[in-house]
Image (cartoon, helix red, strand yellow):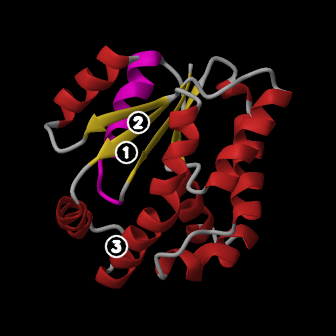
Amino acid sequence: MQLVILGGPGSGKGTQSNKLSQHFGIPWISTGDILRAEITANSTLGKQVSDTLTQGKLVPDTLMIDVIKQRLQATDTHNGWILDGYPRTAFQAEELDFFLDTLNRKVNHVIWLDLPIHCLIERSEHRGAIDDTPDAIRRRIETLLATTVPMLDYYDYRQRLMRVDGNQAPDEVKRSILANL
């Protein structure tokens, strides 16, 4: 099973990805965690993306596509995976599908955790991640509305989009997801 979980900052992508990863026994691939680990390691990639993430901007498509392609070829992904927070743009979505075609795979479902913006802001402010400054949160929400929300049409057209009310208790959100899979 190949799943994508999308939503705004603080929508519960990580929580649900973790729950579904345990439920299905497949890896949870968080682009945010990958990039933050690279920044902490002071790697070449980390140096390239540090300022971008701190400012709440999207990492360039070509760089993210390369990171994801490399990760999806790891041996632990052969039985499936959960992508948390990727793709973020229509271009990334198309490139992901093209890449998966070369592996004879496809995204089975794209789960959109839908929450009102005020909830996203409130949740993000309480997470305490290094890149959760008020300005970065605001910019991430603006970017979400400008690039990710319009991208949902891409998956809706392909009948892979599942909209889930993310403004519920985490176990209720998980039940909603599992009921629709």
User: What's the distance in space between the residues labelled 1 and 2, CA to CA?
Assistant: 6 Å
* Disc number for residue 13: 1
| Label 1: few (<14), some (14–19) or many (≥20) C-alpha neighbours in 10 Å | many
Above or below residue 166? Residue 19 is: above
**Which circle marks residue 132 in the picture?**
3
Regarding residue 87, the answer to whether it shows in the image is yes
In the picture, the quarter occupied by the N terminus is top right
Residue most extreme to the right: 102
Q: Position of residue 156 (x, y in %)?
A: 50, 35
**Residue closer to the observer: 110 or 125:** 110
The answer to whether residue 101 is above or below residue 115 is above
| Residue name at image x 52 percent, y 44 percent | 153
Which residue is depicted at the point 45% across and 17% down?
A: 24
- Amino acid, disc 1: Lys
> Residue flagged by tag 3: what amino acid is it?
Asp
- Location of mark 2 (residue): 17
Q: Earlier along the polypeptide chain: callout 3 or callout 2?
A: 2
74 and 80: which one is in front? 80
Label 1, secondary structure: give it: helix
Element at label 3: loop
Q: For label 2, count other residues whose C-alpha is less than 10 Å away and answer few (under 14), some (14-19) or many (20+).
A: many
Circle nearer the N terminus (3, 1): 1
Main SS class of the magenta portion in the image: helix
The vertical placement of 15 against 120, above or below, is: above
Where are the magenta residues, as a range? 9-24
Q: Nearer the viewer, residue 85 or 154?
A: 154
Q: Residue furthest left?
A: 169
Farthest residue in the front direction? 157
Q: CA distance from mark 3 to mark 2?
A: 20 Å
Does 154 sit left or right of 22 as displayed?
Answer: right
